[in-house]
Image (cartoon, grey):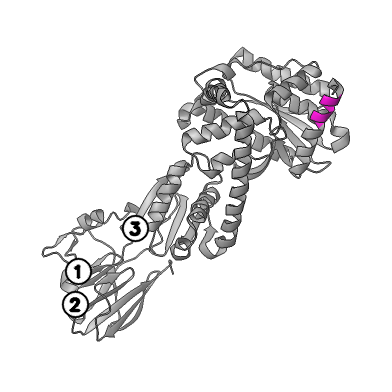
Amino acid sequence: MSSADTTALFERRVADAVRRCGVAPADLLLVAVSGGPDSLALLHALARSRSATGLRLHAAHLDHALRGSESAADADFVVEACRKLGLGITTEKADVAAFQQAGRFSLEDAARRVRYDFLARAAAELGASAAALGHTLDDQAETVLMNVIRGSGLTGLSGMGECSRRRIAGADLLLARPLLGVSRSETEGYCAALGLSPRDDPSNRSPRFTRNRVRHDVMPALAKINPAVRDAIARLSESAARDLDYIEGAVDAAWDDVADADRGRVLIDREPFAGLPPAVRAYLLRRAVRLAKGGLEDLETRHVEDMLSMMEGRAGRSLDLPGGLALSVGYRTAAIGSAGLDTCPLPPIEGETPLAVPGETMVGGWRVAVQAVSDLPGDGADGMRAAISREAAFGGLTVRSRRAGDRFQPLGMTNRKKLKSFIIDCKIDRSWRDRVPLVVGERGIAWVVGWRIAEWAKPSASGPNLLLAFEGEEN
């Protein structure tokens, strides 16, 4: 095949990939250009095929300010390349090092975050329908390996998608990766065929960056075992992506019956959630995090496993997640949302409310039903229902939240203890503690609702007894 044929084939492959992402003729496509061989090849391939695709192009270049005058020279190079192609360009300079220190990210992570934020803002300002990135087949293999090293799950194995959406700075951005089926050597060959001289970034060889160690140490070592390891990893990625699509379809089918996204948090109904297959449960939680946070950055398999364990455990506990999120598990629902939001599913309690015995009483967001029963309906408390003796209600029952100095005699214990100690022993989350309802009689706390009744209030085997039931937001 002649050089001209090879060049034309490269350009057709790029144009076809853009079309597969749904970028239509006359759309404005933002092209991320660093000045290296991959992004330079992408820019020229798109520009040279404009007459066939009908696309409008605009370039974007971010100066990371990490290499002084060399970074500035990269920016000048890209601006000049766009001038020769007759393309507009948006440039920006960012202090990535300062951002890294402020956020305590790795330098790689900080650069990625700043870069995507820049692209999202530029796309929004220009009205671009998508942003094109220069990731290649080699980048895909490296990414999958890095995800494996981090302990990623199926999502990590699927690597980068040729077309994907990412929520950045509150907006959805379509990302197109037209070179994902193209090797790095092919982009270098394409640049050489056009007489282009890409910029060389020496930081791409620095062993301080994980990707560079994978690129220059791990991949060559694996290639000694299997010379086609890059293609093997690509096949693994494609297989994982197919399996992931199937699981995501199952999440779609279950979502409306299990979860509800509302005002920056996602509520999950624990009972139907528990009935889902394990893989579907895991990816439903991942989706909940993505909706609450706007992305899945820093979420690893270990976080998902911790969430699954929490969902199977008792109520009243919470789990901190990356990105300032928290999972809070109630009796019937769990909430995933910003740690700054109210993720406690228990309604607040104001003052002290007398209960109708028997009867129904509204206590804030709770509906409390009390009925007399002649038999023994269970042994003590079971979730939001509890049986206590009729004698425990002599003098009346009230509902309130905890107070300083409260003491409680848990079922099975001969002495009272500080309610605070009982709450800590039960691992009730701090954000819940002032909302846990307390049923109080003349002798003190008869029931810490949702946890345990008092020894002195336990139901009688011969009756009569009372059955108390709390219904609130979780129902």
* Contact, mark 2 vs mark 1 (Cβ under 8 Å): yes
Q: Where 335 falls versus 126 (above or below)?
A: below
Q: Is residue 407 magenta?
A: no
Residue appearing at x 42%, y 52% in the figure: 308
Q: Which residues are magenta?
A: 5-11
Q: Earlier in the sequence, mark 2 or mark 3?
A: 3
* Residue for point 26% across, 80% down: 466
Q: What type is the residue that disc 2 sits on?
A: Ala
Query: Can residue 95 be seen by looking at this rendering?
Result: no
Instruction: Give the dominant element type of the magenta stretch: helix, strand or loop.
Output: helix
Q: Which residue is mark 3?
A: 316
SS type, badge 3: loop
Residue type, numbered disc 1: Ala
What is the quadrant of the N terminus in the image?
Answer: top right
Q: Give how far apart the Cα atoms at labels 2 and 1 are.
A: 10 Å
Disc nearest the viewer among 2 and 3: 3
Residue situated furthest left in the rendering:
414
Residue ID at (79%, 29%) = 10
> In the rendered view, would you say 445 is above or below 186?
below
